[in-house]
Amino acid sequence: MSRSFYIKNTEAPRVMSPNEILSLQPPTFIQYDVHDEEEHFLDVMNSPIDHYGSMLMGEEFVSGRGFEVCYQAELNSYQVRVFTPSTKADWQGAFEFMVNLARYLGVQVVDEEDTTYQADNITYDYLRDIEFGIQCYEGREGQYIFGVNYPMCLNEEMIDRLLSADDKATYFSEMVEAHQYVDAYFAKQRFYESSLDKNEGIIGVYALTEDLPTILPYEYPPFIDITKISLNQEDISRWRISLVTIEGDEDDPNSYKVMGDMDFKTFLERLPEEKIEKLDGHYMIVELSKSDMQDIIYQKSETSSLFGKIKNLFNNN
């Protein structure tokens, strides 16, 4: 669900590039889709935005979900799409973004129901939109919200607290922002095809570095964010994780050594409960020392097997 707004392009047929659009905004406004180390970064940022498609934008360190910006050629208009529900800061940022763009083009802002707003007076009732979206989460445990940094998964407890909050819009905003800006590294998913067996399919891989608070899934199989990766769960034959230690200067890439590589499901089974800090219905923060990693890698296989569990049960009686 979302709400769209349109700003007429008075410069048509010329269409602005992402860099030009962002230059009309305060310097804290950024795009989240293309990273500056990517090969095609400059081409994307300096080409008309309709060459790329929809681009997620927002305010750095402020936005929770951001908003999508694209160009609708059939309408000769820039479209700003705000997700339902979004945070209060997302809405305020989207309004500021639209005001600056509309002022530059000398036009008004029109929403999807053809309601027209003066560029400096967008009065759309965004709090009502947030509350409507929140009500739709009732009974939807496992629903994912896509944030500017990574997705979050609503569990039953989170939904109950959200629905019972006196100020639902504020509670939702604070919940999403706290999740998006938690002080931990979000482990990237990397995908490989086996060089030995082409029939094996695609392997999904995580890495966990010693003493680095890292966000990883605690549910199996891991969630794949299809908004960023063109793969489905059935495309992945297995998941693995590399446990990485630092041997020397942490600023030297050569200091990072793989202690061991293991099946991700086995890793989750061996991970001590006290090392898990759950973030939501799918993700956790985990921080392991070198010693912790050794314990997990070299743990005897029988302790996690059915035989080992039965044996331990009798030994404890």
Image: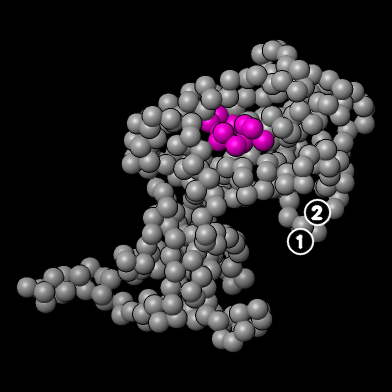
The residue tagged 1 is 37
Is 74 drawn above or below residue 22 in the view shown?
above
Which amino acid type corresponds to the residue marked 2 in the rendered image? Phe
At 60% from the left edge and 37% from the top edge, which residue is drawn?
Answer: 89
For this rendering, which residue is in front, 188 or 59? Answer: 59
Question: Which residues make up the magenta segment?
Answer: 83-93
Is 274 drawn above or below residue 77 in the view shown?
below
At 59% from the left edge and 32% from the top edge, which residue is drawn?
Answer: 83
Is 199 drawn above or below residue 124 in the view shown?
below
* Residue 129 in sight from this viewpoint: yes
Give the quadrant of residue 117: top right
Residue 64 appears left or right of 26 = left
At 45% from the left edge and 81% from the top edge, which residue is drawn?
Answer: 290
Is 102 drawn above or below residue 297 in the view shown?
above
For this rendering, which residue is in front, 27 or 248? Answer: 27
Give the quadrant of residue 14: top right
In the rendered image, the quadrant that contains the C terminus is: bottom left
Expressed as whole percent of the image width and height from the top left, the position of residue 171 reads: 45, 37
Q: CA distance from mark 1 to mark 2?
A: 7 Å
Asked if residue 126 is among those painted magenta in the image, a careful observer would answer no
Which amino acid type corresponds to the residue marked 1 in the rendered image? Glu
Question: Could you say whether the residue bearing mark 2 is in a helix, strand or loop?
Answer: helix
* Residue 232 in sight from this viewpoint: no
Expressed as whole percent of the image width and height from the top left, the position of residue 44 reads: 82, 47
**Callout 1 touching callout 2 (CB < 8 Å):** yes
Label 1 crowd (10 A; few <14 / some 14-19 / many >=20): few
Question: Could you say whether the residue bearing mark 1 is in a helix, strand or loop?
Answer: loop
The residue tagged 2 is 41
